[in-house]
């Protein structure tokens, strides 16, 4: 049995608690929550777990092998570091840390101590994203042309981070997951409409070596909720709509064909190819349940999780460069990779 200690029982904590409590090889040993009303709710829902407002009790508890952190990002670095030094494996909510420096330090510390650090990028465990990755790896799309994502809704406004920090980690993690390429530059533009220093609307453009590009639109100010991604290749194109109840992924056999006309070598003829559309069958298993099971397996077997600290660092590296661009009025910023 893997003993789990959960720190944070706010927005996402109850979902994590529910899934770890259901795993047959896990035991939810303790929950830390400083808000008294939320702590009472945790005690009601999970009477078998000790509920406390002191994180140190979880870190000292010998029945706890792994710490799950579901707090605001400002606390991720300190809590993860303390958990590692206490000899615990860690699963931390996205984004991994506030800065690249913090993430790099935690990666090095986990390696030195032989501990596992996983980052909860839940979308990578969905049947939709797993199918998209399979199609890309199998070459079904051909060479990738672009990745275009829209993630907008009305709220939830955050008081400590902007819309990029809130929404971008999902799509950046998906992009990094389906392609081994890493962006070389970023341009970020945004505007503040509810708080004078916190962007509620933003656009990101990632540049890559070659012709592949990625573009993102994030907003807390949209009248409707949209979660749609386009992944285009030279052979086929994908439309991924996370709000679709069934056919979340649709593959279109559409594209263009370029031909050089013989009579004018400098004239390119564009022809359009229109073929079938099909929607593959996807796994309906709850992504968070699969993530929790994989993390528990990693703790037991010491195997590498799907989203380890290095993958969490990769997302933070892009976010940090995006902030630099945002603060410099949209100037392109290079992203340096080790």
Image: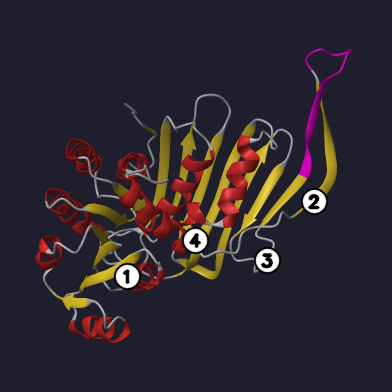
Give the percent coordinates (x, y) of residue 76. Answer: 22, 55
Q: How is the image coloured?
A: secondary structure
Pointer 3: what residue?
246
Q: Dividing the picture into quarters, in which one does residue 156 lie? A: bottom left
The mark closer to the camera, 3 or 2, is: 3
Magenta region: 253-266
Give the percent coordinates (x, y) of residue 170. Answer: 44, 53
Q: Is residue 124 visible?
A: yes
Of mark 1 and mark 3, the one earlier in the sequence is: 1
Pointer 1: what residue?
13
Mark 3 Cα-neighbour bin, 10 Å: few <14, some 14–19, many ≥20: few
Q: Secondary structure at mark 1?
A: helix
Position of residue 218 in the picture relative to residue 197 (left or right): right
- Which mark, by number, is residue 287? 4
Foreground of the two, 295 or 252: 295
Of mark 4 and mark 1, the one earlier in the sequence is: 1
Q: How many marks?
A: 4
């Amino acid at each position: 049995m893997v003993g789990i200690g959960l720190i944070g029982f706010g927005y996402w904590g109850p979902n994590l608690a529910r899934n770890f409590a259901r795993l047959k090889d896990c035991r939810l040993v303790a929950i830390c929550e400083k808000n008294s009303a939320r702590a009472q709710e945790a005690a009601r829902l999970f009477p078998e777990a000790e509920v406390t407002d002191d994180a140190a009790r979880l870190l000292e508890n010998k029945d706890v092998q792994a710490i799950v952190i579901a707090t605001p990002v400002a606390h991720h670095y300190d809590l993860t570091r303390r958990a590692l030094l206490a000899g615990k494996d860690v699963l931390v909510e996205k984004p991994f840390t506030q800065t690249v420096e913090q993430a790099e330090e935690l990666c090095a510390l986990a390696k030195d101590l032989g501990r596992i650090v996983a980052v909860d990028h839940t979308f990578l465990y969905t049947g939709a994203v797993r199918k998209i990755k399979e199609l890309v790896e199998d070459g079904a799309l051909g060479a990738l042309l672009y990745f275009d994502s829209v993630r907008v809704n009305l709220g939830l406004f955050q008081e400590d981070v902007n819309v990029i920090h809130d929404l971008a980690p999902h799509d950046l993690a998906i992009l990094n997951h389906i392609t081994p390429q890493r962006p070389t530059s970023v341009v970020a533009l945004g505007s503040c409409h509810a708080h004078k220093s916190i962007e509620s609307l933003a656009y990101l453009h990632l540049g890559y070596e070659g012709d592949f590009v990625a573009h993102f639109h994030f907003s807390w100010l949209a009248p409707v909720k949209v979660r749609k991604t386009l992944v285009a290749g030279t052979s086929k194109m994908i439309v991924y709509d996370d709000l679709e109840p069934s056919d979340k992924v649709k593959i279109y056999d559409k594209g263009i064909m370029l031909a050089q006309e013989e009579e004018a070598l400098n004239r390119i003829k564009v022809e359009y190819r229109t073929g079938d559309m099909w929607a593959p069958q996807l796994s309906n298993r709850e992504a968070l349940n699969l993530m929790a099971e994989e993390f528990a397996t990693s703790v037991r077997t010491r195997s590498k999780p799907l989203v380890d600290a290095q993958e969490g660092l990769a997302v933070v590296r892009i976010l940090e460069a995006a902030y630099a661009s945002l603060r410099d009025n949209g100037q392109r910023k290079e992203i340096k990779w080790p």
